[in-house]
Amino acid sequence: MKIHKINQQTVFKSSFRQYTPKANKDFKHYGKMIIKTYSKTLREDIDLRDLLRYAVPHFKDVPVVNTYSLACSDLSEAYSYKIAVMEEVPKELQSKFSNVFASDIDKRILAAARSGRINIFSSEFAEALRLYGYDLTKYFKDKKVSVMVQGDDISESDTISSYEPIKELKEKLIIKRSDILTELKNIKDNGNSIVMSRNALPYTSDDYIDEVIYTANRNLKKGSLFAIGEFDNQAIELYKKLLAKDFFCPLSGKNNNIVFEHI
Ligand SMILES: C[S@@+](CC[C@H](N)C(=O)[O-])C[C@H]1O[C@@H](n2cnc3c(N)ncnc32)[C@H](O)[C@@H]1O
């Protein structure tokens, strides 16, 4: 089957934040930490709190749940998921939900992910508290280098700083260089997966998207979840495409949640 190459130029143009020369200079002192894509912790386009409240009873009969963050960027999404697990899942079940397999195609962003630190905007702390009631200062420590940035995707200037995630966020987290389609092709699923693929597919080709959906449909067993964000849905009507396959959307319309269950 033919796999169409994605246009990386498009991906990077739209996904990388533009930093001011001052920000670039300051972050250079910390080498790999310069990179951050258009990603942030606890994004509003998917409510991980609701996702987990649904997933806990849904997966009650499986021994372990594997979560995949496809196009993981700087691990904002993987860390957000782990935070939501610690906040929402009963203590005795947390280890069942803690395996995360994160992958991305871009070498530079993976180097940033593997640096063990993450850049976070100050507004993300306020937003996590407002949207979810989560206090991110419990999860990200050792604040270093704060710089003011004015980026493409933020309308006002904001301060961004480098943090170290606490060790619980880094445990049972496997980072790998791979593309969305390859990961889905190789997935060993037993109806116990949560696959998150957010804010990357809209930058790929129609053929690539169709093949991702075809592969998800073929390789995910009954019960596994496929989560996209509200943005993906608006951009490429993934909702309709997935519904046309054997997926249904149990949390449809609730807090932007576009989480599909394979039936
Ligand atoms: C805008 S970020 C989204 C990050 C994250 N999923 C989120 O929602 O916060 C887009 C990321 O997708 C990655 N990417 C783009 N196309 C990809 C593909 N076909 N397979 C894997 N990663 C891809 C880019 O390298 C970039 O890190």
Image (tube, rainbow, N blue to C red):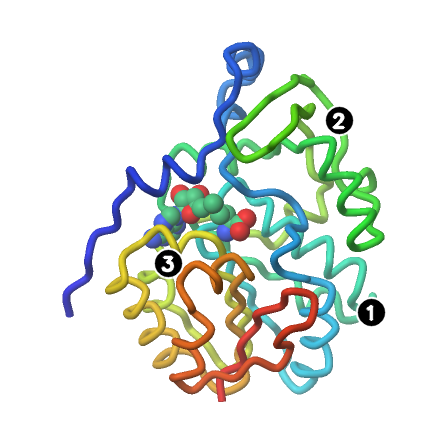
Please state the horizontal and vertical placement of residue 112, each as a whole percent of the image.
50, 32
The answer for how far apart the CA atoms under marks 2 and 3 are is 32 Å
Q: Is residue 177 visible?
A: no
Q: Left or right: 88 with respect to 69? A: right
**Mark 2 residue type:** Asp
Q: Is residue 226 visible?
A: yes
Please name the residue that numbered disc 1 is placed on: 90
The answer for how far apart the CA atoms under marks 1 and 3 are is 31 Å
**Disc 2 vs disc 3: which is toward the camera?**
3
Q: Left or right: 148 with respect to 12? A: right
Which residue is at a point 61% across and 42% down the rendered structure image? 40
Q: Which of disc 3 and disc 2 is earlier in sequence?
A: 2
Q: Which of disc 3 and disc 1 is earlier in sequence?
A: 1
Mark seen at residue 142? 2
Which residue is at a point 65% across and 56% down the rendered structure image? 81
Q: Which of disc 2 and disc 1 is earlier in sequence?
A: 1
**Disc 1 vs disc 3: which is toward the camera?**
3
Please state the horizontal and vertical placement of residue 248, each as a whole percent of the image.
52, 84
Quadrant location of the N terminus in the rendered image: bottom left
**Mark 1 residue type:** Pro
186 and 27: which is toward the camera: 27
> Secondary structure under badge 1?
loop
> Secondary structure under badge 2?
strand
**Mark 3 residue type:** Ile
